[in-house]
Image (cartoon, rainbow, N blue to C red):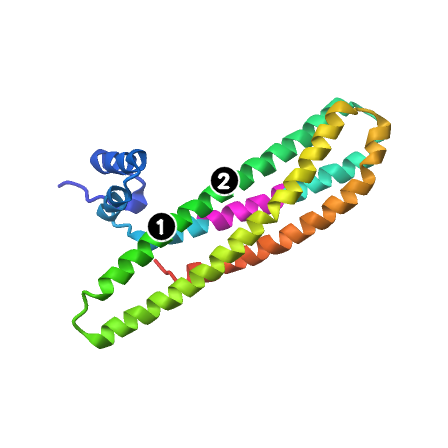
Amino acid sequence: MAKRFSHRSGRIPAVLLLGVICGLLAGCQSTYYSAWEKLGKHKRDLLRDQVEKTRDEQQAAKTEFKDALTRLKELTRFDGGKLEQAYKAVQTDYEQCRDRAKSIRGRIGKIEDISSALFSEWEKELDAYSSEALRASSRAKLNQTRQRYESLHGALQKSTDAMDPVLARLKDQALFLKHNLNAQAIGALKGEVVSIEDDIQKLITEMNLAIAQAEEFIKTMPE
């Protein structure tokens, strides 16, 4: 007896996987969503998944930015050793934070694409109802979902925008150390680190708000 496919098993039939890949390469969203629907995952499922992944990346970003701050604080207390290694550690922290921010922006882009497709489909399907009462109920749910999405999107954008000044400061620190690997340079960074700490604390606050918004949105879109 042939086994039925379950998208939770993680095994995707080759023909459906090809459809997903072709949809991505060709930029054809309808092909992409159609392939996923054959796997039992609809647009609301895909949206929820992306919000969950973005939330998780925000959590990871919090840790990475905190680690970068801790490394800079430790560097200002540097009292001997290999400055080259200290510089490389700061550079690595910056690169990790930069790459994480880029990944989060990509996730937000996917959220925007999926939500746009979901709301467009939902709007069109309202005309398919013969019952005015059911149409009105569906429209109300659409409006509520859209409002919650807008709140989530705003929080995600705000937290992502808050990463930019922090990344710029971390990059400056790494560049400065690259060309000034001496004790005097380390001393000059102390005032900068205090300022960076303020920026990172503000960033963490925005991230926490975005994560909370994501959690609330996920709860309204159960599996």
Q: Quarter of the image holding residue 10?
A: top left
Q: Name the residue furthest left.
A: 1
Q: Is residue 37 left or right of residue 221?
A: left
Which residue is rendered at x = 78% and y = 45% of the image? 194
The region drawn magenta spans 53-64
Residue sitting at 20 percent across and 35 percent down?
Answer: 15
Question: Where 210 falls versus 95 (above or below)?
Answer: below
Query: Taking the image as drawn, is residue 86 in sight?
Result: no
Mark 2–mark 1 distance (CA, rounded to whole Å): 17 Å
Say which residue label 1 marks.
114
Q: Locate the N terminus and report the quarter of the image it occupies.
A: top left
- The magenta stretch spans residue 56: yes
Residue at 33%, 71% (x, y): give it.
140
Whether residue 190 can be seen here: yes
Q: Nearer the viewer, residue 15 or 27?
A: 27
Q: Is residue 108 above or below residue 126?
A: above
Of callouts 2 and 1, the N-terminal one: 2
- Dot 2 falls on a residue whose secondary structure is helix
Q: Amino acid at mark 2?
A: Ser
Secondary structure, magenta segment, majority class:
helix
Above or below, comparing residue 26 to residue 5 in the picture: above
For the point 69% across and 26% down, the residue is 88
Q: Is residue 76 left or right of residue 51?
A: right
Please state, as top left, top right, bottom left or bottom right, where the C terminus lies in the image.
bottom left
SS for callout 1: helix
Question: Residue 116, image x and y in percent?
Answer: 35, 53
Residue position marked by numbered label 2 in the rendering: 103
- Where residue 129 appears, as percent x and y from the top left, is 19, 68
Q: Position of residue 69 (x, y in %)?
A: 71, 42
Query: Mark 1: which amino acid?
Result: Ile
Looking at the rendered structure, which numbered label has been put on residue 23? none
